[in-house]
Amino acid sequence: MTILLVLLLVAVALIAAVYVYDTRQTSHTILRNYPVIGHFRYFSESFGEYMRQYQYLPDWVERPFNRLERAWIYRTAKGISNLVSFGSETSPAFAFRPAAFGVLEEETTEWTPRRIGIADGPGSCIEPYDPPSFFNISGMSYGALSHAAVTALSRGAKMGGVWLATGEGGLAPYHLEGGADVVMQIGTAKYGVRDAHGALSESRLREIAAHPQVRMFEVKLAQGAKPGKGGILPAAKVTAEIAAIRGIPQGQASISPNRHADIANIQQLGAFVDRVRRITGKPVGVKFVMGQESFLDEWFADCTANPAHCPDYIQIDGGEGGTGAAPAPLADYVGLPITQALPLVAEARDRHGLRNRIRILASGKLVTPDKVAWALCMGADYVSSARGFMFALGCIQAMKCGSGHCPTGVTSADPRLIRGLDPTDKSVRVMHYAKRLREEVEMIAHSCGATNAGGLRPEHVTGIERGVGGFRNLGG
């Protein structure tokens, strides 16, 4: 009995020591929020590679992001080597065409920013923008994300040299805290720039534009998670602070209209873009999800006929996009995927002679170097990601985004869970992810014979017929 008692006391002491360590360390959110038992997740993750012959779930079948994709991001964000052994596990639906004679290290050149906005003529702005990175952080609202997550993104974006989009929830102090360039999104409810009646407030718009960090404005028509429906923020997440930022009642569910009440056609869209640009003096873009191809021709024809109506950029979000709560039918079945939409948009823009006037941003599950390089090949000038950066923050794809009980604190409304996410540690991971992804896109470009990522073209990639949906017949 004495020996058993001693062993029991030792076991209790060890568990207590682990508990104390877990609650005080800042590198692992899961361990801070779930001390002791959280180690079982890391044990399973670490040894799963060696035990895969006994697994019933292969690494590449999880949805919406499989284990291989997430593991690449996790390792990259932590600064760990992402080299693979024994060959590839993927079954790619597209492939890059390597040049017979690749680019030597000394022959590489720096990627050159493609200016967004023009300084002269109809549709000009006072402060055009030269983004320092072709890969950036897509819109995620404060409220949908916790304050700790937004703070980490802002700091990491500054260190990584990328811009940070606000999402439709308005500009929060946490977006500005890190000093990164910011894209202010104007959603259908006009959160953050609305008056008491929900209409656009020009005074509020000027106030936000006065921040030197706010480099562009984005009119959101739709997003990939729920095209045709506005944003959804559950009542539990509408705190006094969020209500003040958005200009809405506290404690009530925040549901945006299906579209802007004052934008019902292409001409009104152009007039709204021109109005925002004249008020702010900064570039203005439009975010949408691809539907009818005829819309593109009508829209770009209007831009050609009325240059003042021309947006400075368009962000095409694939139907597979989305970070927050969304109705399943919209998330699953509405909107063209980015693999179909991006080539159509790029071809239509170029056909109307607007290549040097309208920049294209692509988004929608473009979280790894291969997907980003593909988008650049297909005509995107810039690529942005939301969920890729959520994984860099520590998201484990628990599928609790809309509940307020995200176990990693990324989308949580529970202060206890939010406390587990340390912005100082996670901002470094955001920086690592952004920088390493760009480096590996450049590596693909050099293999294809381009001196930098800006030289990627459609002929550098080709579809592979494997019976896999999505990436097929995509160029070359």
Image (cartoon, rainbow, N blue to C red):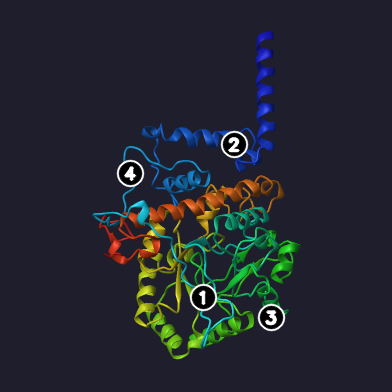
- Whether residues under marks 3 and 4 lie with C-beta atoms below 8 angstroms apart, the answer is no
Q: Which residue is mark 2?
A: 38
Q: Nearer the viewer, mark 3 or mark 2?
A: 3
Q: Nearer the viewer, residue 119 or 396?
A: 119
Q: Which residue is mark 1?
A: 286
Q: Earlier in the sequence, mark 1 or mark 3?
A: 3
Q: Which residue is mark 4?
A: 88
Q: Secondary structure at mark 2?
A: loop
Q: Nearer the viewer, mark 4 or mark 2?
A: 4
Q: Secondary structure at mark 4?
A: loop
Q: Earlier in the sequence, mark 4 or mark 2?
A: 2
Distance from the alpha carbon under mark 4 to that under mark 1: 38 Å
Residue farthest front in this picture: 106
Q: Which residue is mark 3?
A: 201
Distance from the alpha carbon under mark 3 to that under mark 2: 47 Å
Q: Earlier in the sequence, mark 4 or mark 1?
A: 4
Residue 261 visible here: no
Instruction: Name the amino acid, label 4.
Output: Ser
Instruction: Name the amino acid, label 2.
Output: Gly
Q: Nearer the viewer, residue 103 or 368?
A: 103
Instruction: Name the amino acid, label 1.
Output: Val
Which of the numbered marks, if any, corresponds to residue 52? none
Q: Nearer the viewer, residue 4 or 260?
A: 260
Instruction: Name the amino acid, label 3.
Output: Ser
Q: How many marks?
A: 4
Q: Earlier in the sequence, mark 3 or mark 2?
A: 2
Residue 268 visible here: yes
Vertical placement of residue 305 versus 253, above or below: below
* Residue shown at the point (51%, 51%) measured from the top left: 433
* Residue shown at the point (44%, 35%) measured from the top left: 48
